[in-house]
Structures are given as structure tokens and as C-alpha cells.
Image: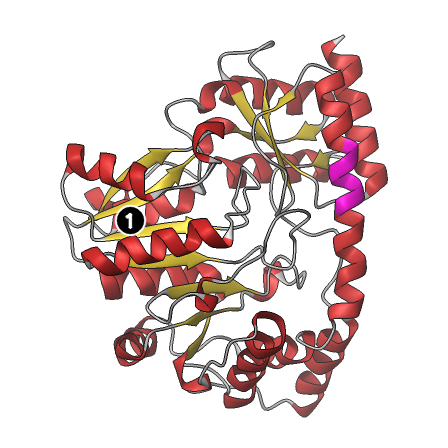
Amino acid sequence: MKVSRRSAVEPFHAMDVLAEATRRRAQGRPVISMAVGQPAYPAPRAALDAARGALADGRIGYTEALGLAELRRGIAEYYRRHHRVEIDPARIAVTTGSSAGFNLAFLTLFDPGDRVAIARPGYPAYRNILAALGIETIEIGVSAENDFTITPESLEAAQSVFGKLSGILLASPANPTGTVTSRAHLKALADYCAERGIAFISDEIYHGLTFSGEETSALEITDEVVVINSFSKYYCMTGWRIGWMVLPESVVRPIERLSQSLYISAPEISQLAALAALGAREELDVHREAYRRNRDLLAARLPEIGFSIASPMDGAFYAYADVSRFTNDSMAFARRMLAETDVAATPGADFDPVDGHHTMRFSYAGSFDEMGEAVDRLARWLA
């Protein structure tokens, strides 16, 4: 059967590595996966109790497309408490994970042929979703020279080469670099976009997992931004597929119309669990400190075995490492590493099609013992 040209996107190699790791584990291999951002911990106890209650009640069905009113109010309260901004719950849309949020944002804000800037290295699904929708991706290289983030100067340079941008997408904390973009940088970007009619999308799905720097929501700076967040990372609810968006008022109804047809609504059981999870920060902060311990371990030990840290580890739960001492083909290196050590990590080519051939991303969202064992295996293998 013929398939569309728009489906010819690059695979998400992290998921391919995870699939191979899962197959090896099913064969009885002692696999340690550092390939995906999958927290080692279950959803908060309150979330699990809420889900059990919903199952016992048995009446799980559709909600309104924008989500349960109680959850939207709870998310608005989160912004009031943690970011000191007042958000009308009517501006909040609950989504089937942040992935649905990106789909909805791109479909609502851009037309085929529009240009959208993202950071390189960056999360590969941005590039793939934009390509599937016929939107041109402009990848802007980030490095120590620009604090590993997009700047107005880099946007200006990109437009001089490629033409006018319709939007930019910035993640802070960022995947895979761990960059936490400062408040001053965020304000400069927001001002630049507002002056030029460029849509600004802020990916904040790793909020709550900041280890150094300023964790600033773009909503503290402007209402003219689409913020996308998720219960997957800090809240340890990856498989529940539940996220949210905060929208300018003018964008709410278009997002709602698309949601009604594309998703109907996010799963009600996940929404009820998410509402309970909002009150579990004390439990979740304990997990964050465990990630911090893992971070410190990898920051010390990866360079010892020859993997230099290629970017900040200020937030999220990834170490982005330069492995050029050992390979110039990160894809082949990742496959061989898994086959010979039973340690799975993601090739940098996933995140950076230009320079990712000599980098790897290691997720430290697992347990401390797993992190230590993984590095021990790699040290023996590389020696």
C-alpha cells in the first residue's frame, strides 16, 4: 500500500534503542537502559489512589476537550504558587501528553511552508512532527558561545539566510543538553518575537527538575506565549499520557476545535490521577534529589572513562557526552555498546543531525545502583 511522503520522517532512535533493550531484557539479559527519560519511580501515591478510586467507581469516560475543570483550576493554582502568576483556568488545555500539545500548537500556529526555529541539539520529535506537517525546521546550533540556548542574535542570523521565521520553540530545561535558559535570556527572546510577530512556544516539561540556574516559566514574562508542560517527568507519569498547555486567549478556541476532532479528550483516569499528583510535591522532591545524586555520579565518572560532558547538566536528567575519543559513528557505537555491555544509551545523531555523530545521551532517571553498574560496565568495556 502506498504511504504518504509526509510519513517519511527519521525514526526516533531513542525509542528504537529502547525496543532493542526491551527485547534483550525479555531474553534474560541484564540490560540497564539509559536510553529514554523514564523515571525510575512510580506515579505519586495520591495519583495511584485516585486512579484506583476511579476504577472502583467504573464511570470513566469522555471529558470536555480542554480537560476537567478541577484539573485546569489545579494547574492554574500551581502557577500561582510556584511562579507567582495568575492564570485564568480557561486558558489551560489538558492534553494527551505533551506530544499532543506539540501537535496542536504546530497545527494551530503554522501553515505548510512556514519556518520554525529550534535548537540543535534538540528533541528530535520537534523536527519530525514539523516535517510531517509540511513545516520547515530551521535548526540553530547552540554551544558554550551562546550559553547553549537560542538568542535574538542567532535568530537574526538565521532569518538573514533562510527568510522570515513564523515561530520558535525553546525548551528549558532542555533535552538533551540540560540547559536552563535564564530569565534574562527568555525575556530577550519573548521581546524579539513580540516585536516581529513570531510565535513563541516554551517547552517546560522538565520544570521541577532544575539543579542549578533559574527555573523561569515564560508566563512570568508574557501572556503571548504557548507553554507546554507534562506530568511525565517530574511527576513520574510517562505512561499515563497526560500533559497541558497554557495559551493566549486568542488561541484557546482554535486549540479546542482541533482537540475535539483529533483526541476528543485526554483519558479521564489520567486526569484524575494528575489532579492528585499536583499535591504530591514533597514526595516528588525526594525523587529529584535522587536524580541529583545520579547527576553528580555521571558528571564525575563519565569523564574518567573518556566521555567528556558536552553541555550543561543544569536541569532535566540527561548527560550529553562527547564520545569522539572512541567513535565517529554514534549510531554504530550505541548498537555495539548495547550488544557487548547490555547498557543502552541514545546516539547523539537523534538530537543533532550535523554534529551528533560523536555524541551520546545518557539518561540518569534510573536508580543510583543502576547508574553505578552501567558506568562500571562501560569502564571495563572501554579499557
For the point 45% across and 43% down, the residue is 123
Camera-nearest residue between 12 and 146: 146
Residue 350 drawn at (x, y percent): 45, 33
Whole-percent x, y for residue 162 in the image: 16, 36
Answer with the quarter of the image where residue 296 lies.
Answer: top right
Residue 3 visible: no
Picture quadrant where residue 352 is located: top left
Query: How many badges with numbers are in the image?
Result: 1
Question: In the rendering, at what x and y percent does residue 53 appear?
Answer: 72, 86
| Callout 1 amino acid | Leu
Q: Residue at position x 32%, y 63% from top?
A: 105
Q: Which residue is mark 1?
A: 130
Is residue 12 highlighted in magenta? Answer: no
- SS class, disc 1: helix
Q: Residue at x 64, y 35 (%)?
A: 21
Query: Bounds of the magenta span?
Result: 292-297
**189 relative position to 284: left or right:** left
Q: Is residue 255 above or below residue 194?
A: below
